[in-house]
Image (tube, helix red, strand yellow):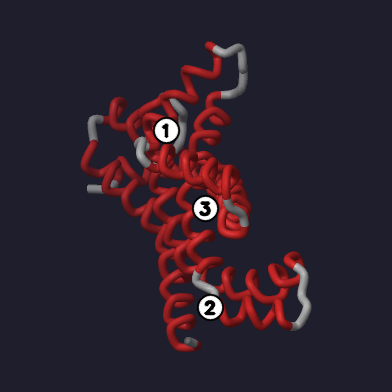
């Protein structure tokens, strides 16, 4: 039954490698961006925090596929010539960053005020307080939701096939057009996606249990 899938597995695995690369680039850089903006937003006020809030709500209010289309078609119109993969990676970075910003901001703001006051009472400056008191706790609380968000963003890479960027889903469509074995191919592709995302999901679940136990 799955002879067609097995015979095309090497080609699909090449697509899976491309999917993983897109996810690592988009989610990795987007997570770093979101952590930076989230900390800045929580520690600042006024125009800076307001601007970050506008970015977060604007990006999160529009589907990631729309951002991919905008990045894919709009950048060349503006004279910015980059590869197709980099165009959709930019959209993934933008989208991931918006979600991670809120995760990081919420983690920083969840630190009990008494600890902040105690650090100030010890004469800590803002940078020292951030490095020694706030960030260690905020990072611990952020890791499980960050991993869960990463799983969602990995699955979101499937949208790039709609734009026209080659990866696992696009490779599967090519195989289906050639073999007409849609059920076998996409069932196998579902398994590949599962094998990519499952370890992240398990890791996130274990961290959540560990954090709940320690607190």
Question: Which residue lies at the image location 43% right of the left edge and 83% below the top edge?
Answer: 212
Question: Which residue lies at the image location 57% right of the left edge and 47% below the top edge?
Answer: 46
Residue under label 1:
160
- Residue 193 in picture, x, y percent from top left: 38, 51
Residue under label 2:
112
Figure check: 107 above or below 65 = below
Foreground residue, 24 or 148? 148
**Label 3 crowding class (10 Å Cα cut-off): few <14, some 14-19, many 20+?**
many
Q: CA distance from mark 3 to mark 2?
A: 20 Å
Question: Which residue lies at the image location 44% right of the left edge and 76% below the top edge?
Answer: 208
Q: CA distance from mark 3 to mark 1?
A: 23 Å
**Label 2 crowding class (10 Å Cα cut-off): few <14, some 14-19, many 20+?**
few
Question: Which residue lies at the image location 50% right of the left edge and 54% below the top edge?
Answer: 100
Tell me the SS state at disc 3.
helix
Tell me the SS state at disc 2.
loop
Q: Earlier in the sequence, mark 3 or mark 2?
A: 3
Q: Earlier in the sequence, mark 2 or mark 1?
A: 2
Residue under label 3:
101
Q: Foreground mark, 3 or 2? A: 2
Q: Is residue 203 left or right of residue 80?
A: left
- Residue 127 in picture, x, y percent from top left: 75, 65
């Amino acid at each position: 039954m799955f002879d067609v899938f097995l015979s095309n597995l090497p080609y699909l695995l090449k697509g899976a490698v491309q999917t993983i690369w897109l996810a690592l680039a988009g989610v990795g850089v987007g997570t770093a961006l979101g952590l930076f903006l989230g900390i800045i937003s929580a520690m600042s006020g006024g125009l800076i925090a307001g601007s970050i809030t506008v970015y977060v709500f604007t990006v999160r209010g529009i589907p990631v596929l729309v951002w991919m289309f905008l990045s894919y078609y709009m950048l060349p119109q503006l004279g910015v010539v980059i590869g197709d993969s980099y165009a959709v990676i930019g959209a993934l970075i933008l989208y991931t960053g918006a979600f991670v910003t809120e995760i990081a901001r919420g983690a920083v703001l969840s630190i009990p005020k008494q600890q902040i006051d105690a650090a100030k009472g010890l004469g800590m400056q803002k940078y020292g307080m951030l490095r020694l008191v706030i960030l260690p706790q905020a990072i611990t609380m952020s890791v499980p939701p960050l991993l869960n968000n990463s799983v969602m963003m990995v699955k979101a890479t499937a949208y790039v096939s709609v734009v026209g960027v080659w990866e696992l889903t696009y490779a599967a469509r090519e195989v289906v057009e050639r073999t007409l074995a849609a059920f076998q191919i996409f069932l196998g592709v579902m398994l590949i996606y599962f094998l990519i995302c499952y370890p992240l999901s398990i890791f996130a679940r274990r961290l959540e249990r560990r954090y709940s136990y320690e607190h």
